[in-house]
Image (cartoon, rainbow, N blue to C red):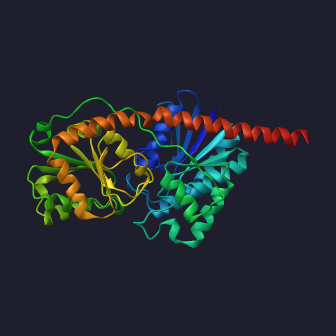
């Protein structure tokens, strides 16, 4: 197959939605011709091949950060993506389009599908439908809801990554569309474990680790306050990720008098990320909502118990008391109690960590890619049968 992915973000730009798109594209590129149409950011080439995937980046306005997109950059991707995409379709043939994020990418994939008469599979990621931390969340605005409803209905197929995302389609947009649920996947983690002493930690320290962009939805401020509230000098918090709240969170650590126990490592490459995960003791997250939660799978693959809230797609595969603890959203007392339970019980940490390494086996990227591959074939066959029927008629 010749596959065209449309996604306004693609690594090194953006967060989990772009990352999983890259993993999927790279896995499918082992067997198919794959092109990605995405945004250009600071110091990025406009057209190149990486890991078998051709990446075409269109210019957008005011994309100054890799971790987060501005509203203007997202809006400007729409006309530029359509313009560049139409040029591409005039030169090359594609069998299928896979559009990631109904907002803002949805209109681009839909326009190119119509222009090239190519079937379009629309993958929704969660935050493009529902983000409780933002007043701009599409579910709060009538015009956006209507636009999304149309895009969902016009796609040849809709894919949701979790039961939560699938339910949000019906709850906030349309019950007429029945999304196909395909869980996301991660590559098998890179080998290697960091030496604690290289990072200034002692063997007896208890390392909590979190991974994600420093944005409001991740609520990392709660984790910083939690470190102080645990009243245990052995407990350290390692934060992997960057974003617009970096300075604000550093100031909070100073106000809470935990600067020596809260460690900001910023954006790290994949190898260092997995080395640090393997070095840690507990993965923690206070994210207000995740459409799926790739970082939870990465933590599980590294043998860590996971403590997070119970609101989002991670409830498909996390089970309280088995994989770690799921806590009611923003129940700070329960969050502290769950983490303290694991801090004080290394045997529990080890048992849950080993269980997680077994459970994550069905969530590697090869399984995710195979599911997408079968869906693409099904949609292409349906399109060909309709064309054949029209021609015979």
Image side of residue 142 versus residue 392, left or right: left
Q: Quadrant of the N terminus?
A: top right
Instruction: Please report the residue visible at 44 percent of the width from the left and 48 percent of the height from the top.
Output: 316
Vertical position of residue 342 compared to residue 354: above or below: below
Q: Nearer the viewer, residue 264 or 54?
A: 264
Image side of residue 361 versus residue 351, left or right: right
Q: Quadrant of the C terminus?
A: top right
Visible residue check, residue 248: no
Instruction: Please report the residue visible at 29 percent of the width from the left and 43 percent of the height from the top.
Output: 268
Image side of residue 343 versus residue 351, left or right: left
Instruction: Please report the residue visible at 44 percent of the width from the left and 61 percent of the height from the top.
Output: 70
- Tell me the quarter of the picture where residue 20 sits: top left
Total count of labels? 0
Q: Position of residue 252 (x, y in %)?
A: 19, 64
Q: Nearer the viewer, residue 215 or 316?
A: 316
- Tell me the quarter of the picture where residue 335 sits: bottom left
Instruction: Please report the residue visible at 23 percent of the width from the left and 45 percent of the height from the top.
Output: 282
Q: Position of residue 322 (x, y in %)?
A: 31, 44
Visible residue check, residue 375: yes
Residue closest to the far top? 31
Q: Position of residue 85 (x, y in %)?
A: 63, 47
Q: Nearer the viewer, residue 230 or 13?
A: 230
Residue closest to the far right? 393
Q: Position of residue 342 (x, y in %)?
A: 19, 48
């Amino acid at each position: 197959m010749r596959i065209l992915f449309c996604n306004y973000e693609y690594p090194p730009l953006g967060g989990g939605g772009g990352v999983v798109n890259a993993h999927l594209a790279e896995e499918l590129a082992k067997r198919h011709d794959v092109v990605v149409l995405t945004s250009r950011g600071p110091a990025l080439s406009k057209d190149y091949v990486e890991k078998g995937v051709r990446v075409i980046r269109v210019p957008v306005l005011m994309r100054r950060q890799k971790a987060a997109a501005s509203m203007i950059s997202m809006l400007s991707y729409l006309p530029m993506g359509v313009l560049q995409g139409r040029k591409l379709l005039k030169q090359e043939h594609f069998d299928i389009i896979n559009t990631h994020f109904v907002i803002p990418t949805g209109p681009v994939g839909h326009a190119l599908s119509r222009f090239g008469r190519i079937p379009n599979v629309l993958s929704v990621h969660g935050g493009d439908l529902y983000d409780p931390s933002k007043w701009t969340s599409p579910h709060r605005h009538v015009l956006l809801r209507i636009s999304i409803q149309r895009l969902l209905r016009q796609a040849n197929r809709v894919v949701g990554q979790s039961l939560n995302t699938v339910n949000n389609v019906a709850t906030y947009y349309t019950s007429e569309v029945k999304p196909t649920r395909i869980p996301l996947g991660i590559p098998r983690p890179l080998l290697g474990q960091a030496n604690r002493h290289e990072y200034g930690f002692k063997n007896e320290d208890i390392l909590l680790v979190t991974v994600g962009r420093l944005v409001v939805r991740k609520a990392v401020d709660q984790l910083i306050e939690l470190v102080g509230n645990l009243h245990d000098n052995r407990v350290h918090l390692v934060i992997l990720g960057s974003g617009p709240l970096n300075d604000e969170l550093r100031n909070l650590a100073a106000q809470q008098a935990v600067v020596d126990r809260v460690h900001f490592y910023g954006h790290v490459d994949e190898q260092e990320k997995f080395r640090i995960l393997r070095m840690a003791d507990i993965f923690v997250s206070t994210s207000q909502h995740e459409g799926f939660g790739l970082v939870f799978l990465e933590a599980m693959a590294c043998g860590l118990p996971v403590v997070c809230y119970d609101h989002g797609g991670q409830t498909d595969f996390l089970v309280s008391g088995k994989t770690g603890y799921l806590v009611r959203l923003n129940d700070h007392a329960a969050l502290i109690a769950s983490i303290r339970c694991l801090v004080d019980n290394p045997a529990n940490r080890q048992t849950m960590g080993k269980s997680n390494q077994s459970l994550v086996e069905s969530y590697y990227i090869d399984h995710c890619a195979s599911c997408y591959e079968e869906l693409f074939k099904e949609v292409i066959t349906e399109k060909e049968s309709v064309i054949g029927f029209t021609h015979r008629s």
